[in-house]
Image: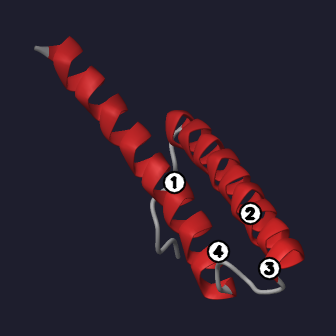
C-alpha cells in the first residue's frame, strides 16, 4: 500500500538541490553561532532556530523549484 505518490525524476533533482541549500544553511548558521560563542561566550541562535531554519529552507526551495517546473510545463503546453 502506497501512502504517497512516487516522485518524478525532476522532483528528485529538485529535492536534492533543496537538501544541498538546506545543508549550506546549516553550515552558515552553525559557523555564525560558533564564532559568536567564541567571541562573546554565548549562543547567537538557539538549536531550535538552527534546526527549523535549515529544514524550512530545504523544503521551501524544493517547493519553489517544483512550482517553477510546473509553470514551464504549462507555458509550453499553451
Rendering colour mode: secondary structure
Q: Which mark is residue 40?
A: 3
Tag 3 near tag 2, CB within 8 Å: no
Local secondary structure at mark 2: helix
Q: Nearer the viewer, mark 2 or mark 4?
A: 2
- Percent x, y of residue 71: 24, 29
Q: Residue at x 77, y 57 (%)?
A: 27
- Percent x, y of residue 67: 31, 40
Rounded to the nearest angstrom, the CA distance separating label 4 from label 1 is: 30 Å
Q: Which mark is residue 32?
A: 2
Tag 4 near tag 3, CB within 8 Å: no
Sequence order check, earlier mark of 4 and 1: 1
Q: Determine the image quadrant of residue 30.
A: bottom right
Local secondary structure at mark 3: helix
Rounded to the nearest angstrom, the CA distance separating label 4 from label 3 is: 18 Å
Q: Mark 4 = which residue?
A: 50
Rounded to the nearest angstrom, the CA distance separating label 2 from label 1 is: 38 Å
Whether 18 is drawn above or below 70: the answer is below
Residue situated in front as seen by the camera: 68 or 7:
68
Local secondary structure at mark 1: loop
Q: Residue at x 36, y 30 (%)?
A: 69
Q: Mark 1 = which residue?
A: 6
- Percent x, y of residue 75: 18, 17
Whether 2 is drawn above or below 48: the answer is above
Q: Residue at x 52, y 49 (%)?
A: 7
Local secondary structure at mark 4: helix
Q: Nearer the viewer, mark 3 or mark 2?
A: 3
Rounded to the nearest angstrom, the CA distance separating label 1 from label 3 is: 48 Å
Rounded to the nearest angstrom, the CA distance separating label 3 from label 2 is: 12 Å
Amino acid at each position: 500500500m502506497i501512502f504517497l505518490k512516487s516522485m518524478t525524476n525532476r522532483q528528485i533533482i529538485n529535492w536534492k538541490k533543496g537538501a544541498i541549500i538546506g545543508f549550506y544553511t546549516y553550515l552558515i548558521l552553525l559557523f555564525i553561532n560558533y564564532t559568536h560563542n567564541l567571541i562573546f561566550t554565548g549562543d547567537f541562535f538557539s538549536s531550535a532556530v538552527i534546526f527549523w531554519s535549515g529544514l524550512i529552507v530545504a523544503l521551501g526551495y524544493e517547493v519553489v523549484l517544483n512550482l517553477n517546473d510546473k509553470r514551464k510545463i504549462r507555458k509550453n503546453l499553451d
